[in-house]
Image (spheres, rainbow, N blue to C red):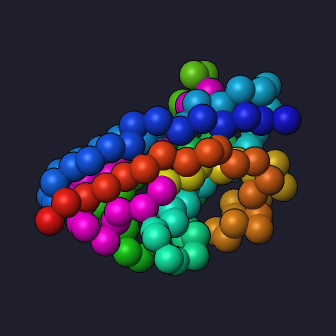
Amino acid sequence: QVQLVESGGGLVQAGGSLRLSCAASGRTFGSNAMGWFRQAPGKEREFVAAIDWSGFNTYYANSVKGRFTISRDNAENTGYLQMNSLKPEDTAVYYCAASSRGYLPRNQDGYNYWGQGTQVTVSS
């Protein structure tokens, strides 16, 4: 069992940066893949980025590639999403998720643990 708590969201101007954190409890976090998703008002939740248990393999949505960086610190049971060059269209609730399924999912069906989300608002 893994519990996830996101933090680091807030209001930022376009072009600015934020770093989201995902604190995990549970001894299995280090063996789980981790992902970030987001949901804007009136839209479906979408994939943002994912990282495998080792941290060596990552995937990004095309919309954030080159601007966002996913990382993790298994010793601290924490995952991160560094977001640079933010745009108004990045405004959404951001969720972290963990997967114990043994591969690196890029869709939400592959994740079995979810946090409550943190709001990110980018003003123009």
- Image coordinates of residue 122 in percent, x first then y, are 25, 58
Taking the image as drawn, is residue 25 in sight?
Answer: yes
**Vertical placement of 63 versus 76: above or below?**
below
Q: How many labels does the image show?
A: 0
- What residue is rendered at 58% in x and 30% in y? 23
Q: 56 or 45, which lies in front?
A: 45
- Image coordinates of residue 50 in percent, x first then y, are 57, 57
**Vertical placement of 25 versus 61: above or below?**
above
Q: 52 or 11, which lies in front?
A: 11
Q: Quadrant of the C terminus?
A: bottom left
Q: Is residue 85 magenta?
A: yes
Q: Is residue 121 left or right of residue 98?
A: left
Q: Quadrant of the N terminus?
A: top right
- What residue is rendered at 67% in x and 70% in y? 107
- Image coordinates of residue 109 in percent, x first then y, are 77, 68
Q: Does the magenta stretch include residue 46?
A: no
**Vertical placement of 6 versus 121: above or below?**
above
Taking the image as drawn, is residue 57 in sight?
Answer: no
Q: 7 or 55, which lies in front?
A: 7
State the image quarter where residue 65 is shown: bottom left
Q: 45 or 85, which lies in front?
A: 45
- What residue is rendered at 39% in x and 37% in y? 8
- Most extreme residue toward the top is 75
Where does the magenta region start and end? 77-93
- What residue is rendered at 38% in x and 43% in y? 9
- Most extreme residue toward the front is 42
